[in-house]
Image (tube, rainbow, N blue to C red):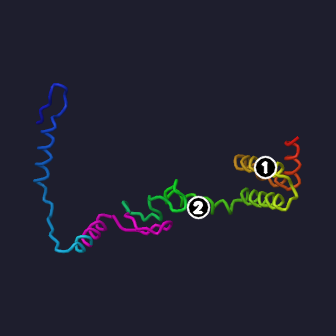
Amino acid sequence: MRSSNSSGCVLLSEISSHMLSLFRSSSSPRYSMSRPMQFYCFDLLNGMHHVHAPSLCQNCGRYFLTTSGRQPKYCDGIAPQDGRLTCRQYGAMQHQKEQNKQHPVYRIFSTRTNTIRKHHQRGRISDELRQAALKLAEEYRDKALLDNDYASHSYAQDMEQEHLYAEARKRLK
């Protein structure tokens, strides 16, 4: 039975002595190694025994230790491509980009915005019209992602080149 002081808290000295008695009573094995490499090998194998296996990050190429039974693809270190993100966040972002390439709404959006950029580079449209058309295309894309009925019926028509330029010209006036 532990005693407590007037505030009801357990004294620190009692906790320390209790912890020491637990540590002394535990039967932790002792190992002696003559070389550091033996220690590292033992530590690696002991970690693997307790489900801590080394893995290679698919983003940065560094080795890291897993802490669960599953084997993640990415580490928690800083991504070399973007210092603001971890490798895990960067990998998730790249995975999402790959999925978006297959999405019909993003495919139409990507095609149309590339056309608008090319027309601007070739001098067929002004910078103001390009900016207005890109903003309008983003609005249509966002609306299509939120509304399936719009995406299946009107989105493709709204994203046609002539319609986008006409709506963008109306907004500029």
Q: Which quadrant of the view contains residue 16?
A: top left
Tell me which amino acid carries mark 2. Answer: Gln
Left or right side of 109 for 46: left
The residue depicted at 41 percent of the width and 63 percent of the height is 70
Judge the density around disc 2: few (<14), some (14-19), many (≥20) Cα neighbours within 10 Å: few
The residue depicted at 86 percent of the width and 55 percent of the height is 125
Q: Where is residue 126 in the image (x, y as percent from the top left)?
A: 85, 52
Q: Nearer the viewer, mark 1 or mark 2?
A: 1
Total numbered labels: 2
| Residue 12 part of the magenta-drawn span | no
Tell me which amino acid carries mark 1. Answer: Gln
Q: Where is residue 20 in the image (x, y as percent from the top left)?
A: 12, 48
Residue 142 numbered mark, or none: none
Tag 1, which secondary structure?
helix
Left or right side of 42 for 19: left
Is residue 53 depicted above or below 88 in this figure?
below
Judge the density around disc 1: few (<14), some (14-19), many (≥20) Cα neighbours within 10 Å: some
Quarter of the figure with the N terminus = top left
The residue depicted at 89 percent of the width and 49 percent of the height is 166
Name the residue beneath numbered marker 2.
94
Left or right side of 144 for 70: left
Tell which circle, 1 or 2, labels the residue nearer the N-terminal end: 2
Q: Are marks 1 and 2 in contact (CB under 8 Å)?
A: no
Q: How far apart are marks 1 and 2 (CA)?
A: 26 Å
Q: Position of residue 44 (x, y in %)?
A: 29, 69
| Residue 44 part of the magenta-drawn span | yes
Name the residue beneath numbered marker 1.
131
Looking at the picture, tell me which residue is in the foreground, 89 or 169: 169
Quarter of the figure with the C terminus = top right
Q: Give the range drawn in magenta.
A: 41-65
The residue depicted at 49 percent of the width and 57 percent of the height is 86
Tag 2, which secondary structure?
helix
